[in-house]
Amino acid sequence: MSTPPNHLVAPPQTGHMPSEKFANELHKNMWDNVVFAEQKGAFAFVASSGLLVYLNQIGEAKSWVSRPCTWTFQVWIAFVATLCLVLAACFVIMVVFPRFPKAKSLFYWRGISESGSESAYVEHFMARTERELEEAVVAHSYQLSRVAKSKYQWLRYAIIAGSIGGLLTLLLGAIVKGKSGS
């Protein structure tokens, strides 16, 4: 398990809440992790889509649309490659799928928008003490960490499926190129 960067190490326990700076840095770090997972997911989706297009261009994307008992080794490779790439794309959809809780809070857009009015939200926000606001930031950081954990789990599945599909696609491309060159 990796250790957090030095600027994210909690200050010594003194019976007080972490400093505002620490809470804000923690929150920013958690938010950046969520955003980075979605960016990686977008890249994985583009890569999977591109490899599916390549399979189609070399004529292998539909080669397995026949009775499986008639499939050759090459057709099996095409089928597994296509399946893995489609799974990778589906897993990526789960990466970008929203996961924020429906609970009302100072930070969730749904809770803010359900305040009734702009002035009601402002009044609710301004009535909070500094400690309550800092606690809300730290609590939101925890929620963001749960969101990031889920996103990275789906991203891991997408990368595994996409890697297998990508390697099989490259193998298939080499086989097709070898056959057309001979």
Image (cartoon, rainbow, N blue to C red):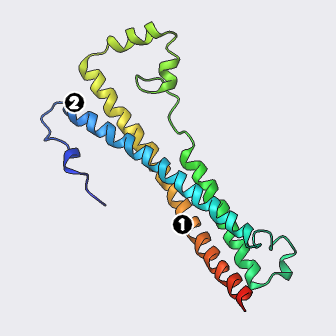
Is residue 137 something that shows in the picture?
yes
Sort mark 1 into few (<14), some (14-19) or many (20+) by Cα contacts within 10 Å.
some
Is tag 1's residue or tag 2's residue first in the polypeptide sequence? Answer: 2
Residue 143 place in picture, x, y as percent:
41, 37
Name the foreground residue: 16 vs 156.
Answer: 156
Residue 132 place in picture, x, y as percent:
29, 21
Q: Amino acid at mark 2?
A: Glu
- Which residue shows up at 80% across the image and 69% down it? 62
Q: Cα distance, mark 1 to mark 2?
A: 39 Å
Q: Secondary structure at mark 2?
A: helix
Task: List the residue tagged with mark 1.
Answer: 160
Q: Secondary structure at mark 1?
A: helix
Residue 182 place in picture, x, y as percent:
73, 92
Name the foreground residue: 119 vs 134.
Answer: 119
Tell me which corner region of the image, top left, top right, bottom left or bottom right, holds residue 18.
top left
Residue 100 place in picture, x, y as percent:
50, 35
**Is 18 on the left or on the right of 154, as rendered?**
left
- Report if the CB atoms under discs 1 and 2 are less than 8 Å apart: no
Q: Residue furthest bottom?
A: 182
**Is 54 on the left or on the right of 107, as rendered?**
right
- Which residue shows up at 19% across the image and 32% down it? 19
Q: Is residue 57 above or below residue 8?
A: below
Q: Residue 20: which disc?
A: 2
- Which residue shows up at 33% across the image and 38% down it? 28
- Which residue shows up at 68% across the image and 83% down it? 177
Sort mark 2 into few (<14), some (14-19) or many (20+) by Cα contacts within 10 Å.
some
